[in-house]
Image (spheres, rainbow, N blue to C red):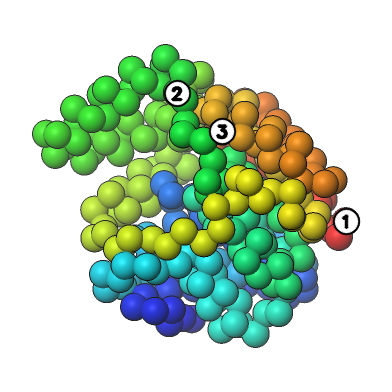
Amino acid sequence: MEVTSGSATLAAESQGSGIDVLLLHAGVTDQRSWRHVVEALPDVHCLTFDARGYGRTTYALEDGWSAVDDAVAVLDAYEVVSAVVVGSSMGGRTSIDLVLTHPDRVRALVLIGPAISGAPEATYQPEVLALDDQWEAAEERGDQAAVNGLEARVWLDGPTAPEGRVTGQARELFLEMNGRALDAAEPGERREDAAAWDRLGEIRVPVLVLVGEHDLQYIKENCAQLVRSVPGARLVELPGVAHVAHLEGDSKTLNEIAAFIAGL
């Protein structure tokens, strides 16, 4: 389905039947990253879409656009009143902002290495700072392939894991998805929907937080703060994986998500 939201035409897909689940992708992937999760939820109605700047979604420059408004537009287009929302990284930020601004539209949250709007400025460990210098140099010389490879090193392999830890189809898909995003036109200035960091205690739905062993340290710390702040939230560390564990088809990630949704 093509869903209109402001200046954007969002490329959305629906699969299966059962409890409604909306999946919001990370800022280095697009909706194709959810394939393993969708396959692990055969008795669920899964909705995915490409955010502005990603995948097949088209848009015109629009300052003040809202990722939350885009997510609500997809729910409305499929006539979904309330959904379990699964968000990875950037999609996790949108998921948290969505439950704070439209609590009636969210039944529960699954957050994978989520970003959190309003969080303190990130502090990077030395191995990430070294890669950041390489990233800036590649940006300056316009070497998008090098930028893409460095982002795979951080977000796919994980900075504390060996380079090239993830191989095969998962790596190829990451590079294709993120490469497309790196080449995309800017959508305009995004609106701040919730400034969630100081409002996490307002969340009143079941929350599962997943974070990879090899994810960035500040993300792990933010996940711990999230779980301390949200009543009843549960944190699970995923051994051997990094920021986008679901893209790898990590069995623990898939099992935790499926069990959480089945238990609602």
In the image, what residue type sits under mark 3?
Answer: Ile
User: How many callouts does the rendering have?
Assistant: 3
Q: Amino acid at mark 2?
A: Tyr
> In the orientation shown, which residue stands out farthest toward the left?
141
Q: CA distance from mark 3 to mark 2?
A: 10 Å
Closer to the eye: label 2 or 1? 2
Q: Earlier in the sequence, mark 3 or mark 2?
A: 2
| Disc assigned to residue 219 | 3
Q: Position of residue 194 (x, y in %)?
A: 56, 58
Q: Is residue 88 visible?
A: no
Q: Which mark sits nearer the N-terminus, 3 or 1?
A: 3
The residue where tag 2 is placed is 124
Residue at (42% x, 39% y) in the render: 171
What amino acid is labelled 1 in the image?
Answer: Gly
The correct choice, above or below, for 65 with respect to 144 in the image is below
Residue 41 percent across, percent down from the top left: 72, 60
Identify the disc placed on residue 263: 1
Is 8 placed left or right of 104 in the picture? left
Q: Which mark is residue 120?
A: none
